[in-house]
Amino acid sequence: MLHICHPFHGAILNHRHGRQTPQGLTIEVKGTAPLGVAVTVNGVPARRDGEAFLAKITIDRFENTITAIAQGVQGAAEHKIKVIWDKNSVKRFRFSIDDNIFFLQDLVKNKPKSLFDNLYLKQLKKLHDDFGVKFTLNLFFKSHDSDFDLTCVPDTWKSQFSDQSDWMRLTWHAYCEFPDRPYQYASAEKVGKDFDLIQGEINRFAGADAWAPPTIVHWGELLPSAYKALVSRGVRALSGYFSKQELRYAVSYGLDEARCAYLENHDAMMDFDSGLVFSRTDIIFNSTPKVNVIPKLAPLMDDPRNAEYMDLLTHEQYFWPFYRNYVPDHSERIATGLRLLVENGYVPVWQHEGFLGVEPCA
């Protein structure tokens, strides 16, 4: 059976995966085919070694179709895949914070003149000032243990949110923290309704400049039939864990096992049917002790499959001393990771802009 094994269908390829020039990226295509048949890949004759074949081809556009054709006495067979050329890729990182609601409750309760009199936002501002990091704050609509919801937030700080929107943006995460996995079996209509609800409130109290398309769904579980609700609202990339836990892959957006297994060991992958890019989260700071931050990130920086794009995550609640699982050195953990990346040439980006933060090629 003719089959292209490498690259993977949906692979995102950059200068680390071949020889790149302004005109294209030359890569190796590997696969298997029946013995004794001639194989070409995009018209290039492949070298055979038993059932294996290998050909070097050049891809020269953002979306590229790779076609292998096997021709033998019994006829011809064809296998096609598609890959992305991330031509303008640079070492970059993005930072997302899940489960935000406490800081808004605190603002409403204490009514500070400045956003950065807030304990949480003050820490984020320092991290930004020190490392240039850009934060996307993923919001719940309501608190799970009180009557507080986003309609309670006045527009008192609207101009301040707008002024800080070059490095801090707000977006939809879920209606509420509980129940767990709220969108695992939700309809596209339900997803869209909650999305619109939170976007409307953010626009009201923080302004349109402070809004960013979401990049993480609460618990990362979603039916593929609901992707359209996000894509139609401007979502182009979603982050998840894609890690095998017992019998299933966690935080994996309903992707099949083969693609989850690929993402477990690669930065990202394109789903051509929906147009969504799926990115694997590289570290969760609230669950990574400070001493383990560098050992977690450093090997990824040396791995061509994972080195170009660092997807960083934490959760708001662990910043707050009143929270039962408060992490006293939360900011220090984050600073340790950011320092490592910045000192090694990584730059901050918004995941939702361009193609994972860089300009896509034509």
Image (cartoon, grey):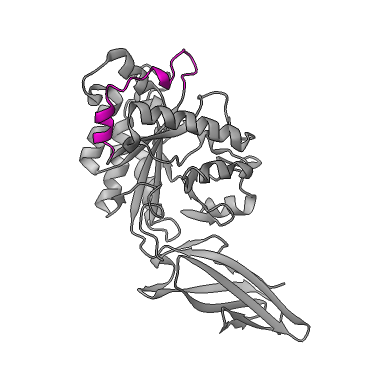
350 w.r.t. 54: above or below: above
Residue 26, position in %: x, y? 45, 75
Decide if residue 266 is in sight here.
Answer: no
Name the main secondary structure of what is drawn in magenta. Answer: loop
The residue sitting at the right extreme is 74
Q: Position of residue 59 (x, y in %)?
A: 47, 73
Which quadrant does the N terminus fall into?
A: bottom right
Residue 152 drawn at (x, y percent): 39, 17
Residue pictured at 51% horizontal, 68% vertical: 64
Q: Residue at x 30, y 26 (%)?
A: 120
- Image height of 296 relative to 100, above or below: below
Quick one: 203 or 139, which is closer to the camera?
A: 203
Is residue 156 located in the magenta-colored stretch of the structure? yes
Q: Nearer the viewer, residue 94 or 104?
A: 104
| Res. 329 image quadrant | top left
Question: Where residue 93 appears, x then y in whole percent?
Answer: 35, 49
| Residue found at x 32% / y 25% | 328
Classify residue 135 as left or right of residue 214.
Answer: left
Q: Range of the magenta residues?
A: 142-165
Q: Is residue 199 magenta?
A: no
Check the picture and name the quadrant holding the C terminus.
bottom left
Residue that extends furthest to the bottom in the rendered view of this protein: 73
Q: Is residue 238 visible?
A: yes
Query: Residue 308 sits in which quadrant?
Result: bottom left
Q: Nearer the viewer, residue 238 or 154?
A: 154
Front position in the image: 120 or 101: 101
Tell how many labels: 0
Residue at 52 percent across and 64 percent down: it is: 83
In the rendered structure, the answer to whether residue 234 lies left or right of residue 289 reads right
